[in-house]
Image: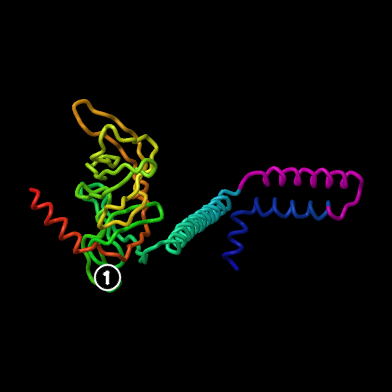
Amino acid sequence: MQRLFNILVTFKEYVVVTLLIIISLILLIGNDTPQVRAIRSYTVGFVGAIQDVLSLIPNIVELKQENEVLRRMNVNLSDEVSRLREARLENLRLREMLVMKDRGEFKLLPAEVIGKSLHLLRNTLTMSAGEIDGVKIDMPIISEQGLVGKVIAVSSRYSIGQLVINKDFRSSAKVQRSRVDGIVTWDGGDVLHLKNVAKKQDVLSGDLITTSDYSNVFPRNIKIGTIASVSEPPGSLFKEIDVVPSVDFPSLEEVFIIMAVADTERTALEHRTLHIKQ
C-alpha cells in the first residue's frame, strides 16, 4: 500500500489530470444541453473521419500474409496446370500409338524411352524392354512419327537402339512419289542424306522418303523424312539430297519395337556375294 501511495505522490500531476478528464467526460455524458449535443456530434464525426482515414492505411503484416497465401496458390495451380497438360499430351501420344498398333501388319511391342544421347556421332536410346519381352538385335524401332532406328544391344530387361541420326546407320529408302531408290545416311548435321541417287532421277524438294522394299531389316513404307533440298554438284554423278527426319528425337518418350527379325539366310547370301565381288 505504501508503494502505491508513493507512486501516486510521484505522478500526482498526471493522476489529477486523469481524474479531471474522467469527471469532465462524466459531466458531458450526463449533460444534455444543445451545446453539449453539438460537441458530441462534432466529436463523433471527427472520430469517424479519423477511422476512415486510418482504414485506408494498409496493414503491412496482413498484406504480407495474404501475398504469401496467393503465391502458394499460384504455385499449386501452375503445378496442376502443368500436370494436366502433360497428361493430355501423353494421352494424345498413346492414342496415336494405339491407332498405329491396331493398323500395323507387324506385331508391335511398346517400350518407354528411359535414356538417350543426342549430341554424339553415334546416338542411341535406352528402352524399357529386353530379352524377356522377346526383343532381339536388329529389330526395327518406330514411333507414330516414323522410323526411329534399330536394336543393337539387348539385356534381360533393357535394350539399346541405334538412332537414324547415328553415323553408322544405313537404310535403303525410296522417294514415295517417283519410286526412286537410295540409301539414307547421317553425317552429324541437322539433316539426313539420301545417297546414290543419279542426277537424271526425278527427285524434288518436299518429296516424302520412306523405307523401301529392298531392306532386310526395316519393313517397307515406314516414313523416314521429307526432302529439304536437292542440288547437283559439278563433277559428280549423283545428286546431293538433304532430308529432314520425320521423328522429333528430343521429344521422343515412347516407341514401338517391331517384333520381326532379319532373314538370316538372305543376309548371309548377300554378304557372301559382296565378298565375292570384292
Residue 175: % across, % down: 34, 43
In the image, farthest residue toward the top: 234
Quadrant of image for the N terminus: bottom right
Q: Is mark 1 on a helix, strand or loop?
A: loop
Q: Which residue is drawn at 59% across and 55% down?
A: 10
**Magenta stretch?**
29-58
Compare residues 81 and 175 and report the one nearer the observer: 175
Q: Is residue 51 magenta?
A: yes
Q: Which amino acid does label 1 sit on?
A: Arg
In the image, farthest residue toward the bottom: 132
Left or right: 80 in relation to 204? right
Residue 231: % across, % down: 29, 30
In the rendered image of this protein, does residue 256 appear above or below residue 240? Answer: below
Tag 1 residue:
157
Left or right: 220 in relation to 167? right
Q: Which residue is drawn at 21% across and 63% down?
A: 153
